[in-house]
Amino acid sequence: MNIPATMRALRQLSHNGPRDMRLITDAAVPTPGPDEILVKVTVAGVNFADLMQTYGRYHGGPAAPYLAGFEAAGQIVAMGEAVTGLTLGAHVIGTGYGAFAEYLVMPTSTVTPVPAGWNDEQVLGLVLNWGTALAALKILGRVTAGETVLIHAAAGGVGQAAVTLAKHYGATVIATASAGKHETVRALGADHILDYHAVDVTAEVLRLTDGRGADLVLESVGGATFHASVAATRRITGRVVVYGIASGEAMISNRELNFIHPIQVMGLHIGILAQTAPHLFAELMDELSTLIAAGVYTPGRPTVYDLADGPRVLAELEAGVTTGKLALRP
């Protein structure tokens, strides 16, 4: 395949938010390193991490100016010399810096094939959304049938996957979402849906669990919501898995964990998991394949926009008016 020298891409110029993101047409097409592949991007996933990065708040992310985006699906057009197990022309989903572009370099540690019978749009979210939800529920959360799971931001990409999976594993789901998104979450099978703008989430969770608290909390919001999550978690055996800080950082002290909230708090980042525990990442991908075969995880239906609309899409994500998976087509 003839690979051009330059490409269309979205460049973030500053750390002042998505308003400083621009479409350019002369970005250099990257070259894969020894353990990397070059993918011709069919579609790129939009995630909250992309929004955080436009403000420079995503830990380990690139400094401005940079090519935006973390997730994409497409066709392999070049491979590094050390790459094995992949073939030119295959369609894959994976992550890498600069996904909002026509071409993207991906480390092979985060790459998985597009499932048979699926197109590239349908597979968006397999690693970042479904992989994160599954890791939070099973690897770290150790959810079992009959337990109660509190899932925040349940109408988002990870949230919708988490509700679906938690119900599949036999849990009772308490979900939080703004009022306009309740029908979306209810259709996924959530048992209770709370409007975090209108109710005291901690009090409602305690009421719904007869004062015991949730056995497992999936926490992606941070800030005051993190403290509400901790207070709503069952003492001693309750687990909180933290995989996001959308509303900012929050702290819990060793004194609180010892005397006030004796619970289990764990952190999760799917990229770090893939890099440092590749055997667990492989298990996740195998389990997702099983869930696909069983019809639990069905092809996604992202809302797809043109690459040039990226700044507006991120602004709407920031405003909280979006639902489900969002994507950009270069």
Image (cartoon, rainbow, N blue to C red):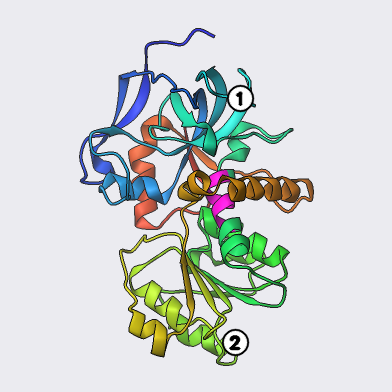
Residue type indicated by callout 1: Thr
Tell me which segment is drawn in magenta: 127-133
Q: Main secondary structure of the magenta part?
A: helix
Q: Is residue 226 left or right of residue 161?
A: left
User: Quick check: can you spot residue 187?
Assistant: no
Determine whether 129 is above or below 194 in the image: above
User: Quick check: can you spot residue 95?
Assistant: yes
Determine whether 122 is above or below 84 in the image: below
Question: Is residue 231 magenta-colored?
Answer: no
Crowding at dot 2, Cα within 10 Å, few <14 / some 14-19 / many 20+, comes out as: some
Indicate the quadrant containing the N terminus: top left, top right, bottom left or bottom right: top right
Q: Residue 236: x and y, percent?
A: 53, 84
Q: Is residue 80 left or right of residue 289?
A: left
Labels 2 and 1: the sequence-earlier one: 1
Q: Residue 189: x and y, percent?
A: 67, 66
Residue for point 69% across, 66% down: 167
Residue tagged by mark 2? 209
Which residue appears farthest toward the right when viewing the image?
294
Residue for point 39% across, 73% down: 225
Residue type indicated by callout 2: Thr
Dot label at residue 136? none
Crowding at dot 1, Cα within 10 Å, few <14 / some 14-19 / many 20+, comes out as: few
Indicate the quadrant containing the C terminus: top left, top right, bottom left or bottom right: top left
Q: Quadrant of residue 21?
A: top left
Dot label at residue 84? 1
Q: Residue 201: x and y, percent?
A: 46, 80
